[in-house]
Image (spheres, rainbow, N blue to C red):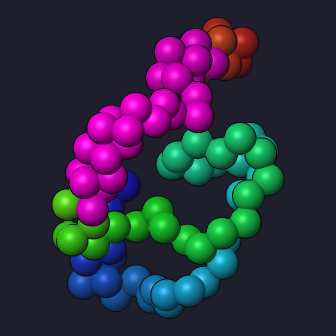
Amino acid sequence: MMSLDVLLSAGVPWCSSRICCHFPRAYHSGFSPGYYCGDVADMANTESSSVAREAAIHSAAIRCPPMVSRFQLSYDLAVSLCSS
């Protein structure tokens, strides 16, 4: 993962409000439980870290559990590595 600032300074074209579709088992830096269509948000600028930090603190404060536990993700990764 790279900051959007790094990519922009390297001349990589970027347009806001583009739409990206992810399909099950397709490569993605995050977790996708299935078909997903939404605004592309994989690249972050320098201001994003403070927003992400505040969101994590808020989620913890309201005791909002993640959709899938990190243990399940680790197990799934281990199984996929063993079977390949």
Q: Residue furthest front?
A: 62
Of residues 74 and 27, the one drawn nearer to the viewer in this rendering? 74
| Picture residue at 47% right of the left edge, 63% below the top | 42
Q: Tell me: residue 32, above or below residue 13.
A: above
Q: Quadrant of residue 63?
A: top left
Relative to 2, say whether 70 is above or below: above
Left or right: 21 in relation to 18:
right
Q: Is residue 47 above or below residue 59?
A: below
Instruction: State the image quarter where residue 22 is shown.
Output: bottom right
Q: Residue at x 40, y 67 (%)?
A: 43
Residue 10 visible, this angle? no
Q: Tell me: 21 left or right of 75.
A: right
Q: Quadrant of the N terminus?
A: bottom left
Q: Could you tell me which residue is drawn at 40 percent across and 83 percent down?
A: 12
Q: Is residue 54 magenta-colored?
A: yes
Rendering coords of residue 19 (x, y %): 66, 78
Q: Which quadrant holds residue 11?
A: bottom left
- The magenta stretch is 51-76
**Where in the figure is residue 16, as x and y percent of width and height?**
49, 87
Query: Looking at the figure, which quarter contains the C terminus?
Result: top right
The foreground one among 18 and 26 is: 18
Chief secondary structure of the magenta portion: helix
Q: Is residue 57 left or right of residue 30?
A: left
Can residue 64 be seen here? The reply is: yes
Image-based side of 80 in relation to 56, left or right: right
Where's residue 79, x and y in %? 65, 12
Residue pictured at 58% horizontal, 42% vertical = 31
Q: Does the magenta segment cover residue 74?
A: yes
Q: What is the x, y in percent for residue 61?
A: 30, 38
Count of numbered tags: 0
